[in-house]
Image (cartoon, grey):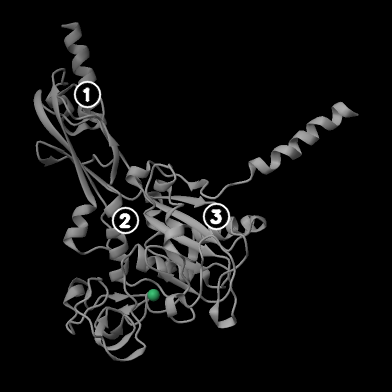
């Protein structure tokens, strides 16, 4: 009997050691090196040791809503299109007590990140955390070797609440939690402003640096989109109100997620998100080494972040090569003459969600190789690279062999 019990006893003894510790990190989605991805890091607050499964489930729900929304992807566009540009991680955060502080009901609980409603005297729904405590758990502060580009905090609370400074914080138990989270992430990662008013006076500040509000009643800031009729958010124009003020400030659409939950992001916000994504990600992850001259390479290649999303163009000595439209290029297929050539790959994201030239520039990347072709095939035989010419070439070669 003793021998049969012993393994069971030792398992029980080990179990507490296997529990996650604060700061432990689980990578939920790994699309590539963090050096060329937007890293989303989730933390939880107000989840006790017994509630960690709830935390994990709520993180998964948010991740699905953001990248895998199916029919409802319009609520989170442009994120589904750029899913492969992101990695997603969850950090274990165990609180002594459950929930969040709520001064309106005299509720005060001991949680790891100190989440509270009415944060710093704000409105009741302003739910935010102690950033100093959260910062201690960030990957680059705990030896995980990468920086959290998007910081999300799910709070184990069900009353409507959220806010954003450096973290996007939201009450994960609220029925529209994912909508709050997307709006708050629009502030923190997207650097977008609220498009709603509220205070019945004129906006008192200087011209905001945010791209979706302006004091200029002509809306010059989003001139490139003016009049564009977005199927979800209406005609881009100049709508008074924004950043919590009713007058003296303007926003670009009749309604959007920076104004109301369950709306789409408007064209200005979508373009801004794409710009922010490309602040962290370049189109090309890797490419064939181009430091020296390559002699008769059989294949030039680039590896892009998402081959489904990009347009690939190949140029030889500046001339676009028709028919070369993938991540790989075989110089022997295109009838090139012997000698030195410069071959260039151009990888472009040609989405119609971006119109700003400076942003478009970030969405294109080029790589060039110097290639020396020595053992080139007969140019006439290979002109056009068609099957017919290949067959002709074979015939010619046979004739010559006989001669
Ligand atoms: Zn807001």
Q: Earlier in the sequence, mark 2 or mark 1?
A: 2
* Picture residue at 51% right of the left edge, 65% below the top: 114
Q: Earlier in the sequence, mark 1 or mark 3?
A: 3
Quarter of the figure that contains the C terminus: top left
**Residue ID for mark 2:** 277
Q: Is residue 161 left or right of residue 343?
A: right
Q: Position of residue 327 (x, y in %)?
A: 29, 38
Quarter of the figure that contains the N terminus: top right
Tag 3, which secondary structure?
A: loop
* Picture residue at 22% right of the left edge, 53% below the top: 362
Q: Earlier in the sequence, mark 3 or mark 2?
A: 3
Q: Is residue 225 left or right of residue 192?
A: left
How far apart in space, not on screen, are marks 1 and 3 (Cα)?
52 Å
Disc number placed over residue 93 in the picture, else none: 3
Pick whichever, 246 or 380, lies toward us: 246
Q: Is residue 163 visible?
A: yes
Please state which of the two labelled residues, at mark 1 or mark 3, is closer to the viewer. 3
Q: Position of residue 130 (x, y in %)?
A: 45, 64
Pick whichever, 350 or 23, lies toward us: 23
How far apart in space, not on screen, are marks 2 and 1 (Cα)?
34 Å
Q: Position of residue 106 (x, y in %)?
A: 59, 80
How many residues crowd around disc 1 within 10 Å: few (fewer than 14), some, or many (20 or more)? some
Q: Is residue 169 above or below residue 24?
A: below
Please state which of the two labelled residues, at mark 2 or mark 1, is closer to the viewer. 2
Q: Is residue 318 left or right of residue 359?
A: left
**Residue ID for mark 1:** 297
């Amino acid at each position: 009997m003793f021998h049969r019990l012993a393994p069971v006893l030792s398992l029980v003894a080990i179990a507490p050691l296997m529990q996650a510790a604060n700061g432990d990190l689980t990578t939920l989605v790994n699309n590539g090196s963090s050096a060329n991805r937007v890293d989303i890091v989730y933390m939880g607050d107000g989840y006790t040791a017994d509630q960690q499964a709830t935390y994990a489930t709520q993180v998964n729900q948010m991740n699905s809503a953001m990248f895998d929304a199916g029919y409802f992807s319009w609520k989170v566009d442009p994120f589904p299109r750029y899913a492969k540009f992101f990695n997603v991680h969850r950090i274990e955060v165990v609180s002594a007590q459950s929930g969040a502080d709520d001064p309106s009901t005299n509720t005060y609980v001991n949680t790891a990140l100190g989440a509270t409603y009415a944060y710093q005297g704000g409105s009741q729904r302003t739910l935010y955390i102690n950033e100093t405590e959260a910062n201690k758990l960030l990957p680059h502060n705990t030896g995980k070797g990468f920086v959290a580009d998007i910081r999300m905090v799910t709070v184990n609370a069900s009353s409507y609440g959220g806010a954003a400074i450096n973290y996007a914080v939201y009450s994960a138990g609220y029925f529209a939690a994912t909508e709050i989270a997307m709006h708050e992430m629009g502030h923190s990662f997207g650097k977008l402003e609220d498009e709603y008013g509220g205070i019945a006076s004129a906006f008192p500040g200087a011209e905001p640096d945010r791209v979706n509000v302006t004091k200029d009643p002509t809306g010059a800031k989003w001139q490139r989109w003016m009049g564009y009729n977005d199927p979800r958010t209406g005609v881009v124009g100049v709508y008074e109100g924004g950043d919590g003020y009713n007058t003296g400030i303007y926003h670009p659409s009749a309604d959007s997620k920076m104004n109301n939950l369950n709306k789409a992001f408007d064209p200005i916000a979508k373009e801004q998100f794409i710009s922010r994504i490309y602040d962290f990600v370049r189109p090309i992850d890797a490419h064939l080494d181009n430091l020296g001259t390559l002699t008769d390479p059989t294949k030039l290649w680039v590896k892009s972040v998402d081959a489904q999303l990009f347009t690939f163009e190949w140029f030889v000595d500046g001339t676009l090569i028709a028919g070369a439209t993938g991540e790989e290029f075989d110089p022997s297929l295109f009838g090139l003459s012997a000698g030195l050539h410069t071959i260039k790959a151009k990888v472009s994201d040609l989405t119609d969600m971006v119109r700003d030239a400076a942003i478009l520039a970030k969405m294109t990347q080029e790589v060039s190789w110097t290639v020396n072709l020595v053992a080139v095939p007969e140019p006439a035989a290979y002109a056009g690279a068609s099957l017919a010419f290949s067959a002709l070439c074979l015939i010619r070669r046979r004739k010559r062999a006989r001669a």
